[in-house]
Image (cartoon, rainbow, N blue to C red):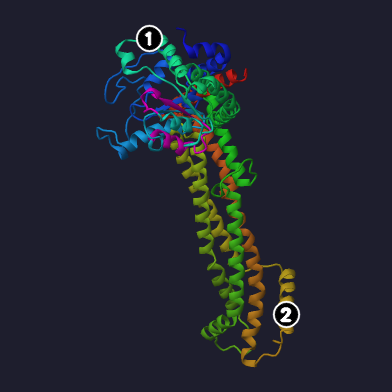
Amino acid sequence: MANLLYAEYEEKVRPYIDLIDSLRKLGLNKDLPLPTIVVIGDQSSGKSSVLEMLSEVALPRGTGIVTRCPLELKMKNGTMASQWKGQLTYGDIKKLIHTYIGKEETIILVVIACNVDIATTEALKMAQEVDPNGDRTLGVLTKPDLIDRDTEKDILKIINNQMVPLRKGYMLIKCRGQHDLIANTSLANALEKEIAFFNDNVHFRPLLEKKIASFQHLSSRLTNELVLQIRKCLPAMQEKIGSKINEIVKQLDKMGGAIPEDPTTRVHNLTRRILGYCDEIITLAMGEYKKDYSIDMKLHDFARDKFAEWYKKLDGVKIGFNEGAINLVKHHEKNSKGRELPGFTKYRIFETIIREQIQELLEPSLEMLNEFSAKVETACNTLALQHFSSFPLLVSEIQIKIAEVCHKMERKAEEMLNINFKMEAMVYAPDEMYSYKLMEFQSRGQQKGNNSVASSNFDAQAMVIHLHTYYQIAIDRLVQMVPMVLRYYLLQELSAQMKVELAQLLFHSKDVDALIQENDETAEQRRELKNNLDRLTQARNLLMNY
C-alpha cells in the first residue's frame, strides 16, 4: 500500500515539507520552533494506532502502559535545584507535553476514544490550556466500534461541535481492533475494513461523505492543515531568523574579530583595538559621545555636575563669610590690638583672615579631586573590559596601566592645586580691579543704610568691606581654577597619556601573543556564534525561495 501521507505530500506539499525537513537538518529547530504535528491523548486512547495507520510504521504493542519503545529520546543534565529522584511525576510529564503543544507553530492532534467521557479527557483539557480558542487543535475520535448501541448520537454531537467546540473540529476513524491484531491484519486491509464499517453504519455513513471520517480523509486533512500552518509561519520565521542573525552579528562585533594567524597581522589587529580603546576614552573625556553610553560612563557629564556643585559650594561659603566677617575682624583685632589709635586698620589682620578662609577650601577641592579620579579610573576599567574581555592577560596589563596613569595624573593635579592655593595666600589683585570691586561694595553698603557706624565699630566695618571685596575676587578665581586643573589632568592629559602608555605596552611587550590569547570560554562562544550564524544564513537563503 502506498503511504497515504507520502502520496498527498508528493502531490500537494512536498516542496514545503522538504523545506521544513531541510531546516531541521540544518538544526534550525534549535533556534526557533518549526511547524509540526503533535499527537497527544489519554492512556489507551489509540495514539499508537493512529500513528501506525498514517505512517505505516509498526509500533510496539502490549497491555498496560505502552509504547515502551521511544521514537526519540533526549536526555540532559538536571540542575541542582531539580535533583533527579528516579521517577517522573504527573506534573513533570505535563510540563514536558506543554513544551511541545504550547508552541504557536504546532498543530495539536488530540486522540480521544469514543467510549470515554470527553468532558473528562485530560489530553483535551491540556490542549485547551495552550489553545483556548481551538485554532490549532484537531480532535480525532477513535474506537467507534466499541461504543454501546444507540450512543452514536452522542458521538455525532461531539463531531458537530455541540459538546466541546474546536475551531478545526473533529474527525472519526477506526483503527485495527484486537481481533485484527491477533489475525495480523495488514494496514491496507484495515483501511478497507474501516471504509466498510462506516458505510455499514447509518449514523456514520454521512460523515464519510462529508470527508470527516476515515484515515484517508484524516491524512488529507492533516496534509492540508500542515501546509497551511507552514505557509502561515513562513513570514514570521523569516523575520525571526533575520532578527537572530542581526543579534549574532552584534554579539560578534562586540567581541571583535577573531585573532589572525599571521604574526604581523596579529600586531596590527591589537594596535587597532588599542587605538580604538584610546579614542573612546578621549570621546568620553571630551563629551563627544558617538554612541549611547550609560550615565556612569559619561565622564564629561560627571565633571559638569561636580563643577556645578563646586560653584554652589563656594557661593555658599562666600555668603557665610560675608555674614560672619565682622565677628572675625573683631576677634583678630581684640587679640592683636596694641597701642594703635582707632581708625588705624592693620593690613596683617586682613591678610591673616583671607589666608585662613582660602586655606579652608583646599580640603574640599582635594576631596573632589579624589572622587573625580576614582570615577575616571572606574570608567576606564569598564571600557577596557568592554573592549578586551576576551583577553584576560591584556585586560590585567591595561588595568595596571590605568591605575598608574590615574595615580600619576591625580598627584600632578594635587600638586597644581596646592600651588594655586599657595599663590592665593599671597593676597594679590590688580589695583584697578580691586578699586572697582571696593567701590561696588561701598555703594551697596550705602544703599542698605550702613553708612552710619558707631565709632567703636569703625575699624571693624572698614575691614569687613575690604575683606568682602577681596574674597569675592579670590572666590571667582577658585571657582574656575579648580575645575580647570581637574579637567586638564584627569581628562585631557590622562587620555593622552593612556595612549602613550598603551603604545609602549604593545611595542615593549616580550610576548604579544600571550597578551591576545583568548580564554577558552570566549573562543568557544565565538565558534558557537559563527556556527549559529552559518546555520541561520543557510536557513534564510532557503526561505527566500518560498
Circle 1 packing at 10 Å, graded few (<14), some (14-19), many (20+), is few
Residue 188 placement (x, y as % from top left):
42, 9
Residue 160 placement (x, y as % from top left):
51, 31
Whether 395 is among the magenta residues is no
Circle 2 packing at 10 Å, graded few (<14), some (14-19), many (20+), is few
Question: Mark 2 sits on what residue?
Answer: 444
Helix, strand or loop under label 2 = helix
Query: Counting residues from the N terminus, which is met first, the one under dot 2 or under dot 1?
Result: 1
Whether residue 436 is visible here, answered yes or no, is yes
Q: Magenta residues?
A: 121-149
Question: Mark 1 sits on what residue?
Answer: 186
Total marks placed: 2
The C terminus is located in which quarter? top right
Along the viewing direction, whichever of 318 and 222 lies nearer the viewer = 222
Residue in view at x 66 percent, y 77 percent = 466
Whether 133 is among the magenta residues is yes
Q: Is residue 475 above or below residue 393?
A: below
Residue 291 placement (x, y as % from top left):
62, 41
Q: Amino acid at mark 2?
A: Arg
Q: Amino acid at mark 1?
A: Ser
